[in-house]
Image (spheres, helix red, strand yellow):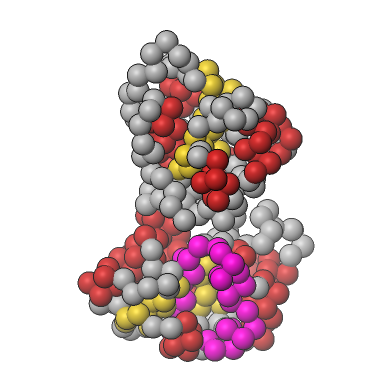
Amino acid sequence: MRSGLVRFARSLPKMLEPQLVQHNFGAHRPKLAVTCSDIPSCYIDLLNEKCNVIVCQGTTRTDILRTISGAEGILWLTADRLDSEALDAAGQQLKVVSTMTSGMDYVAAEEFLKRGIALGHTPKVVNDPVADIAIGLMLAAARRFHEGRLKIASGQWEMRPQWMLGQDVPGSTVGIVGFGGIGQTILKRLQGFNIGRCLYTGRTRKAEGDKAGASYVDLTTLLRESDFVFIACPLTEQTTKMFNRETFALMKPSSVLINVARGGIVDQEALIEALKNGTIFAAGLDVMTPEPLDTNDSLLSLPNCVVVPHLGTATQQSLLDMFTITANNVLSVLAGGPLIAPFRK
């Protein structure tokens, strides 16, 4: 998430400004806290028209907790743990917090319910950009982009028919683990690739899956039959290290794994082992553990692993849309209205 802020905050054209809902606060100017300073000034200027905005200028948790003290509303724009400590630091006057993410694994949602504090996030808006990068990773991993680049750099470019053969997407079986908004959008993107069939798994069978012609199966069946496996589910106690030595052993040696969800869903050491041993063919990762990844991490030395630094939502329009929803969530509640995009666990 933060990568989107870093990459585009200073380069946004002025025409790309958030369309904030007009709210009447009367004579009162609510205190708003923004937990990250890497936001275009035009965004902050809009908030300042009717609110007293304080922006965190530091990057440590101590800086953030100090900034949110006394705030009535918080735009939580970092991946720091949003828990009882943070709510205590804000104070009893706090009414609403909105994150700028869809995934909420770092949020203690039960604390908000217990204290009666409204909690918003930014679902749906992330579906398109994350699905786009998932397809990019699929192609890059299947067609060996990273490995090919390494061959060029080391002078090992060979001119023969069977050199650097990759995996075919047309006619393949695609498995999607987690068939929410992102998973469904991935399938929509795949419709132009003439895949053979789509399998998906999750907590329940979805009407959207039936409509799209996808088959609801258990995880074991999906792993055994899929040529491409997309991870698009939330990180929970149930999904933590869902992909491990046992599950990798179920997959085809020609299969490609793509993770655009959370790094914690994959046992990273087991993935490295599977890629080295040929248990699976390749992987494309937008998420990993930890983030940022250590420069000496073994993932980076693998020719059959494409790694990008959590760029799923890093587009100009996505940043604009996510900030707009985040701000409108907070402003709406402070004006006595409902959340625009409430988080429901």
Q: Is residue 284 above or below residue 121?
A: below
Tell me which residue sits at (63%, 79%) in the image. Answer: 244
Determine if residue 154 is in view: no
- Farthest residue toward the right? 296
The residue under the point 56% across, 56% down is 105
The reply to whether residue 40 is visible in this rendering is: yes
Seen as rendered, the residue at the extreme left is 211
**Residue 93 included in the magenta stretch of the image:** no
Q: Which residues are the magenta region?
A: 226-251
For residue 193, what is the image quadrant? bottom left
Q: Quadrant of residue 246?
A: bottom right
238 inside magenta stretch: yes
Spot occupied by residue 52 in the image (x, y as percentages of width and height): 52, 18
Task: Name which residue lies at 52% across and 75% down.
Answer: 257
**Residue 89 relative to residue 211: left or right:** right
- The image shows residue 59 at horizontal and vertical percentages of 69, 36
User: In the picture shown, does residue 256 fall above or below 321?
Assistant: below
